[in-house]
Image (cartoon, rainbow, N blue to C red):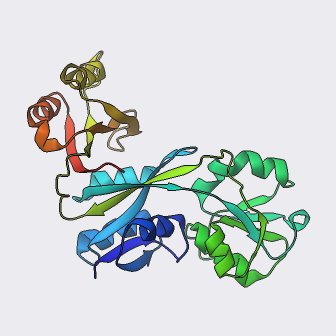
Amino acid sequence: MARIAVLGPEGTFTDEAARRYLKGDFHYYDSVTLIFEAVNSGECERGVVPIENSIDGSVGETIECLKNYDLYIVGEIYHQIRHVLAGTGNIEDIRTVMTHHKVIGQCRQKISKLLKSPKIVTKSPSGSDLSTAGAIEVVARKRDPSVAAVGSKSAAERCGLKILIPDLSDMEDNETRFFIISRQEAKRTGRDKTSILVAVKDEAGALYRLLGIFAKAGINLTKIESRPSKDRKWEYMFLIDFEGHKDDVGDILKQVKDSTTYYKLLGSYPRG
């Protein structure tokens, strides 16, 4: 049975998404970086990591790891997210809210509207980043009616917490996209998508010329996002997703590579 690395503990949204679409022996890690490490070392065959949320945008740690590790994207998962507020007391008791730091951007409006200026905690007592399921476990252990957690309904119910607010997301249609990563490339399916990471010269028209290569070939870009390169300040890299398999557009990708200062193929994989 394949070993699959996901964000833990059990009950995170990453865990939910992975279990919905994959079968295997699930192993839990405290960060995206540790998931990449587990797959890169061979400890796990595959990993599932969040790449972007429909409300709060991209996950910088995932993009940085895609740059730093020689792994392939072999699939994508779109998973509906419904955050609940869970605790042991009542809504009027809440003074502290614990959750993963990315979740705050997805629930900020409702938190400010429904709660009285709570303290937001995104770190565990040991100082590491909390996952949503980890936050729920901390609240369940504390049994403090003034402390609540934001996470999944399944994790809250598993830990015996009350559901105080059943849907805390600012948008009704809240969705997170996840990448499946592996040391081996995915097989071609005929309905694929390809992701690349590139950088261009810091000069007028450089990005325009790069995008023009795709436009002239009639290739549909489904995502383009700039990220700091972290090599030099004010220099940027671009994560680009486009429809099609790399083997169908080899000449186009050669043109792209020749027009960039940095190029990395992240993988071709079945569209979610």
Q: Is residue 195 left or right of residue 105?
A: left
Q: Is residue 66 left or right of residue 245?
A: right
Which residue is painted at 34% across and 67% down in the image?
A: 47
Position in image of residue 83 (x %, y %): 66, 59
Q: Which quarter of the rendering shows the N terminus?
A: bottom left
Rendered image quadrant of residue 226: top left
Which residue is painted at 72% across and 80% down in the image?
A: 140
Q: Residue furthest front?
A: 190
- 2 lies above or below 269: below
Q: Nearer the viewer, residue 138 or 73?
A: 73
Which residue is painted at 76% across and 49% down in the image?
A: 110
Position in image of residue 55 (x %, y %): 58, 44
- Any part of residue 124 in sight: no
Which residue is painted at 64% across and 63% down in the image?
A: 122
Q: Is residue 77 left or right of residue 186?
A: right
- Any part of residue 79 in sight: yes
